Amino acid sequence: MGIMGRLIMMAMPITPRFVIRWVANRYVAGEDLDGALKVMRDLGSQGACFTIDVLGEEITSLEEADFFVEEYARVLDAIVAEDFDANISLKPTAFGLLIDEAAATANIERITRQAAENEIFVRLDMEDHRVTQPTIDLVTEMHKLGLTNIGTVIQARLFRTESDIANLASALSGASDVRICKGIYLESEQIAHTGYREIVEATNRAIDQLLDAGSYTAIASHDMPVIDHSLSALSQRGMGPNIPDPRAEAGGPRKGKGPGYEFQMLLGVRGNVRRKLASDGHRTRVYIPYGSRWYEYSIRRLRENPDVAWHIAKSIIMPWTNRR
Ligand code: FDA
């Protein structure tokens, strides 16, 4: 699989932009907010809720953060105006985290406050290892300010994950809200698991740990061994569709959330699995990225993890492996 991904990556520089655009169309909801709203309206009948992401990351000057602050304000206004069952996901480096932590914190606080006024949740996506701790710190900082409508993502491939989950649960108690995923960034073997089997096992352990710690657990995976494990871990704990969260450590119900957990998937990936989960009554959320930087986003994601290129190629050659 790694070799296939690498071969596809080598062909990228000679692949016409319109071909990449055609492929990206499946995974990116358009260049502007109207495109994202249209995709959400179209998907509305599938029993899913949404998280909206404005594409862009790692800005090089703080002025660039203004665009993201304003655009997310428009996204929040649109969610309220159209009464969408949606929240937002944002990348802290798009707000300046790698340039000036204090400025990034102020930018993110502004968005989180506007979201809080409308009971909308804010998820800080997790980027590469340089910002793991600063991103977690941002979340605890916001909670100290009384903004509890914010959580982050934990990447199960990282060795530090077990202690990050424990620390977040103890710092935020019932208000800890974590999206758990494998992690898209290929980190070094000094700090992360690198084999498929180890990563799946680490992801399943992290899901168990989150459930036992009382955290709201957003399971973000398209991989059946992870989804199947999650379903049995939930049922072992008496959790499931339409059952109030039985965990003593968990906080009370929150607007827009499931009974202590939900499943999340990316736009365009394994819609058939998502629809089955939804029809079984589980809360399912689709991650909706949009923005004019779709080309840079697509190329960068592929460079970071060439296996994604293979998943995409496979879904074109063998569409039954990935029904939209
Ligand atoms: P795996 O990679 O094994 O995929 C299982 C199957 O799903 C594949 O065989 C393929 O069929 C299909 N598939 C998966 N990804 C595909 C793709 N891109 N295109 C086509 N088919 C695909 N990571 C991170 O580091 N920080 C973050 O904040 C987030 N946020 C996030 C949100 C949500 C909602 C999801 C679903 C994922 C993330 N991720 C992430 C990415 C995550 O860490 C991980 O890289 C991907 O989900 C792929 O891992 P899977 O568990 O899906 O398994």
Image (cartoon, rainbow, N blue to C red):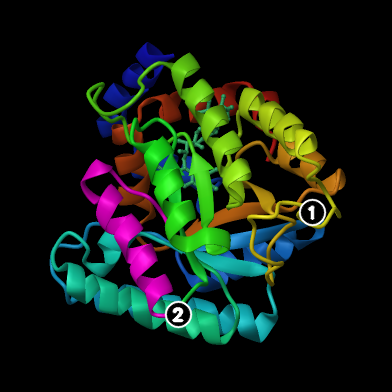
Tell me: 88 left or right of 12: right
Q: Is residue 66 in view?
A: yes
Residue at mark 1 to residue at mark 2: CA–CA distance: 34 Å
Q: Residue at x 38, y 21 (%)?
A: 5
* Magenta span main SS: helix
Residue 25, x across and y down, in percent:
52, 49
Type of amino acid at the residue the image marks with label 2: Gly
The quadrant the N terminus occupies is top left
The quadrant the C terminus occupies is top right
SS of the residue at dot 1? helix
Mark 1 and mark 2 in contact? Answer it, CB < 8 Å.
no
Q: Which residues are magenta?
A: 124-146
Q: Nearer the viewer, residue 14 or 256?
A: 256
Residue 107, x across and y down, in percent:
30, 77
According to the image, label 2 marks what residue? Answer: 146
Q: Earlier in the sequence, mark 1 or mark 2?
A: 1
Any atom of ligand 1 within 8 Å of the CB at mark 2?
A: no
Q: Is residue 30 in view?
A: no
* Disc marking residue 46: 1
Residue 244, x across and y down, in percent:
81, 57
Q: Residue at x 64, y 57 (%)?
A: 250
Q: Residue at x 30, y 42 (%)?
A: 300
Examine the rendered structure and indicate whether residue 69 appears above or below residue 31. below
